[in-house]
Image (cartoon, coloured by chain):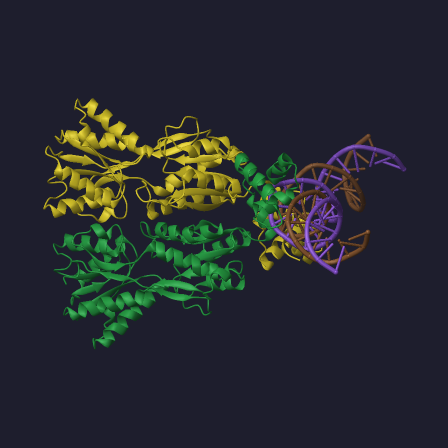
Chain colours: A green, B yellow, C brown, D purple
DNA sequence: TGTAGCGTCGTAAACGTTTACGCCAACGTT
DNA sequence: AACGTTGGCGTAAACGTTTACGACGCTACA
């Protein structure tokens, strides 16, 4: 005898009553409920999730898909850890669990996602690192799985998403550099088809235009989103005949490799090249010279993600009457020394 | 009509036969199997995991518990990402999925684990960041859940574990520094009760003893395992009246804060203080001066973890006749400039 | 006294799958 | 011709829950 059945036998009541007591239903006496909860705690009873899922067609868990591949933006040191924490804080209010679903590097993300939703091990999903055209969005929409994307996409449809303010960051970076006298400003963008690169580039172009500066395609530096990419970025910049005097970065750890490349050439950030980094993080805080970059709260971002997801899950939507939000997450500029300003 | 029932109806055969065909059982004709697989692929059928789990009492998934809290050794996204990839590579051979279980910062890890195993959403578990006494190990043992620990522990029992070679790293660090003439060598250890700190310290002491050097408790620097901890470490060292000339680190990102602290004092790693870092990582590769540290393959580590876990899962043990392995994972010294050698 | 309403609880079906068991036809052997 | 064997398939139970439904006893009110 196992599970709820054992509990019921122990208390000499039916399993139906036990279930109702545990689930907080109204039609059970206070006395019985007390006895059930007490016995459950004592016997360490936890409902078998498979049984629940099968019966009610939901799993009481949501998934967060992450891609393990290198060169994926956001895939840095403690980014997801911080976001997860915020997500859980909100989910806990509804007794929902979070499972992270790491997509292997050698598997197609869409195929992986399809497997996961087929298995029905989560009720809703958060996907990250959206691509310009992201088949996962079509898949989730078609399968009617509630989801929210961390990152915009050009895939049509009015699905909910949250995204960092890539164009705002690019714009403010250019503004700041222009007002300090720079006219040749390079922009680093990812070398893959991840969508944020396009958004970043758009912001960069728009800002140049507003300042009456010409757009020079040779100043768009495509490098992988990694420390090594930053190193390569530095190499590419130094190799140019008509060097930019400043560069804005789209990924937080590019600055590290770039610093190194400059150091090897006897140059220094802020003095020989103005650098505006992306997301403030534990690493950037300890770089010398201090990196000018943008701050955001990962925990708040995670909480907003979870709220947006819950808003699109019928069972929880009434508590989050947001509709399908599409929101750009603001980031605060933290002045440092790397831009020489 | 849904699921396997729909598939069976479509093909005019019984659901039992469909199930057997999909699961590769022998008592089904080649012709029938072909038709079933074809129809399943076409209709996009994926077995409902809840139904399977309920019936066969297993979930075809294993969990990897990670703790979100700061100051946990190894607690960086890129560390786990690398390990996950190796784990998945092995699990895929058995059609097992990996789910990462992030324990919220504000929840007790043991209570969290208990909830997860109660829900029975995984058949086996990998736990990480083991503490000196780790209640999770008792819990898993008592519940007879197959598991492997990433990290040793003083908790008794012969459970399987894998651990980085903390004492070996400490010993080799001291050896290297002593042969370069250093006699006052500090050791950074974590300020919490995570077990690796004790192992590291033991290796440090043993090495000193073998070289006939006295053990000076004031040279044991307890700092949080974070970049900020490294900064504090630098501060503490510089504040000492009788400064060490060298320091060995137990955590990969300590070096970053330490470098910064030195830079602010006008000092430099390798010249004014010999530093031997811990794990080579994307950040350390781009620090100047180049950090002397230790290399390991995260992917291989993940694969070994998965193999060890499978070896303790009855359903897969025959393919992994290892028994309960307790293994120290080797790390290769990568000379840099930070130790001045 | 009859009855409606309410609070409490038991009963049993249902969720989607796997698998033990048994049946049937075909075939080979004696 | 009788019998055993085998390959292939259908049947139905079982896994642990939740929940619609109905039963029962009690109170209150007509």
What residue is drawn where x is 47% and y is 34%?
B140
Q: Nearer the viewer, residue B99 or B265?
A: B265
Residue B111, quarter of picture: top left
Residue C30 rendering spot, x and y as whole percentages: 82, 30
The answer to which of A195 and B128 lies nearer the viewer is: B128
Q: Quadrant of the N terminus of chain B?
A: bottom right
Q: Is residue A266 left or right of residue B203?
A: left
Q: Residue at x 24, y 25 (%)?
A: B206
| Image: D2 above or below A131 | above
> Residue B95, percent across and down?
52, 45
Of B287 and C30, nearer the camera is B287
Q: Position of residue A55 (x, y in %)?
A: 61, 50
Would residue B40 be seen by someone viewing this image from the given angle?
yes
Q: Is residue B339 visible?
A: no
Q: Nearer the viewer, residue B169 or A14?
A: A14
Total numbered labels placed on residues in the image = 0
Residue A276, above or below A285:
below
Residue at 23% across, 59% down: A293
Compared to A339, does A30 lie above or below?
above
The answer to whether B189 appears left or right of A131 in the picture is: left
Please tell me which residue is depicted at 29% across the width and 70% down the height of the picture.
A203
The percent position of residue A80, horizontal first and vertical second, equals: 36, 52
In the rendered image, which quarter contains the C terminus of chain B? top left
**Quarter occupied by residue A128:** bottom left
Would you say A240 lies left or right of A107 here? left
């Amino acid at each position: 005898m196992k599970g709820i059945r054992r509990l019921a036998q122990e208390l000499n009541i039916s399993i139906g009553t036990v279930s109702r007591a545990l689930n907080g239903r109204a039609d059970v006496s206070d006395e019985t409920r007390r006895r059930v909860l007490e016995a459950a705690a004592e016997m360490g009873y936890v409902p078998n999730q498979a049984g629940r899922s099968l019966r009610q067609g939901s799993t009481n868990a949501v998934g967060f898909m992450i891609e393990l591949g290198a060169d994926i933006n956001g895939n840095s040191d403690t980014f997801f850890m911080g976001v997860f924490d915020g997500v859980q804080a909100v989910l806990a209010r509804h007794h929902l669990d979070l499972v992270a679903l790491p997509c292997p590097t050698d598997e197609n993300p869409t195929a992986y996602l399809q497997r996961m939703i087929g298995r029905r091990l989560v009720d809703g999903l958060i996907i990250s690192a959206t691509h310009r055209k992201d088949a996962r969005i079509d898949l989730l929409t078609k399968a009617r799985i509630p989801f929210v994307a961390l990152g915009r996409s050009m895939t049509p449809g009015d699905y909910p998403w949250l995204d960092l303010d890539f164009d705002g960051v690019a714009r403010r970076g250019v503004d700041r550099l222009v007002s300090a006298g720079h006219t040749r400003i390079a922009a680093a963008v990812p070398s893959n088809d991840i969508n944020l690169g396009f958004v970043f580039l758009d912001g960069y172009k728009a800002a140049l235009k507003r300042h009456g500066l010409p757009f020079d395609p040779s100043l768009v530096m495509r490098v992988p989103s990694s420390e090594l990419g930053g190193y390569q970025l530095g190499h590419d910049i130094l190799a140019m005949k008509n060097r930019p005097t400043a560069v804005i970065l789209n990924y937080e750890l590019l600055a590290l490799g770039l610093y190194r490349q400059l150091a090897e050439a006897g140059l220094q950030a802020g003095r020989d090249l103005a650098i505006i980094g992306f997301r403030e993080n534990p690493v950037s805080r300890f770089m010398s010279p201090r990196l000018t970059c943008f701050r955001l709260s990962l925990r708040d971002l995670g909480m907003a993600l979870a709220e947006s997801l819950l808003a699109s899950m019928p069972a929880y939507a009434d508590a989050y009457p947001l509709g399908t939000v599409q929101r750009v997450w603001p980031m605060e500029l933290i002045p440092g020394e790397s831009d020489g300003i």
